[in-house]
Image (cartoon, grey):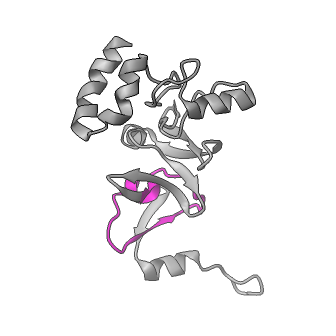
Amino acid sequence: MELERIHLLPYVEKTGLKKRFHSVFRSGGLCRVKYCANPVRVRNMCILHYKRYAEKKILPLDTHLSPNSTEIEGAVSSIRLRNSSNRTVAEALIDTDDALKVGRHIWSLGGRGVKARIKGKSVMLSRFISDCDGKLLVAYLNRDSLDFRKKNLRVVDHSEIRIWHSKTPSSNASG
């Protein structure tokens, strides 16, 4: 515990959070939940995690700051995605080559797709993997929005995406 406080001290002094973290150094610790940097209040936990523990009698192992877990299976890796309530809701497929690049950020599944906050901006996973910027869009070749392998992603402009997403009507007799 002493080692953690020594490493935290320069960060606290640099960012000006000395007032908030003063109780950490006085009480002697941080919350025992992984990736939580709040000061200890009750049973080696911060107030937030102690309330969750008191309600459900289960110690939360993950916070919204915990990195996504990644399973590597040969050339394809899967990454578990969480929603805003920190519940695992889906798994996305990525190339193993991109696993290290993607694993540095915390990805979550929302209404508009898989996103992360990178340098203060919201970034879509498909654009992050394909290095797409500007007004170009990313199309999924197999129409699976949770398949982020490079062979499934294609960078297109607005006119191409309209053609790509248009379906042949079911009443069409020739096609």
From the top left corner, tell me how far across and down residue 85 is, in percent.
Answer: 62, 46
From the top left corner, tell me how far across and down residue 90 is, in percent.
Answer: 63, 46
Does residue 37 appear to the left or right of 93 in the view shown? left
Does residue 125 appear to the left or right of 87 in the view shown? left
Residue at 73% across, 87% down: 172
Residue at 36% across, 42% down: 101
From the top left corner, tell me how far across and down residue 14 is, in percent.
Answer: 22, 36
Q: Is residue 123 visible?
A: yes
Q: How many labels sit on residues?
A: 0
| Most foreground residue, 168 or 94 | 94
Image height of 127 relative to 52, above or below: below
| Most foreground residue, 99 or 110 | 110
Quadrant of residue 138 within the rendered picture: bottom left
Image height of 51 relative to 24, above or below: below
Does residue 21 appear to the left or right of 74 in the view shown? left
From the top left corner, tell me how far across and down residue 83 is, in percent.
Answer: 60, 49
Residue at 45% across, 83% down: 159
Q: Is residue 146 visible?
A: no
| Most foreground residue, 155 or 65 | 65
Q: Which residues are magenta?
A: 123-150
Quick one: quadrant of the C terminus?
bottom right
| Most foreground residue, 125 or 143 | 125
Quick one: quadrant of the N terminus?
top left
Residue 152 lies in the magenta-colored region: no
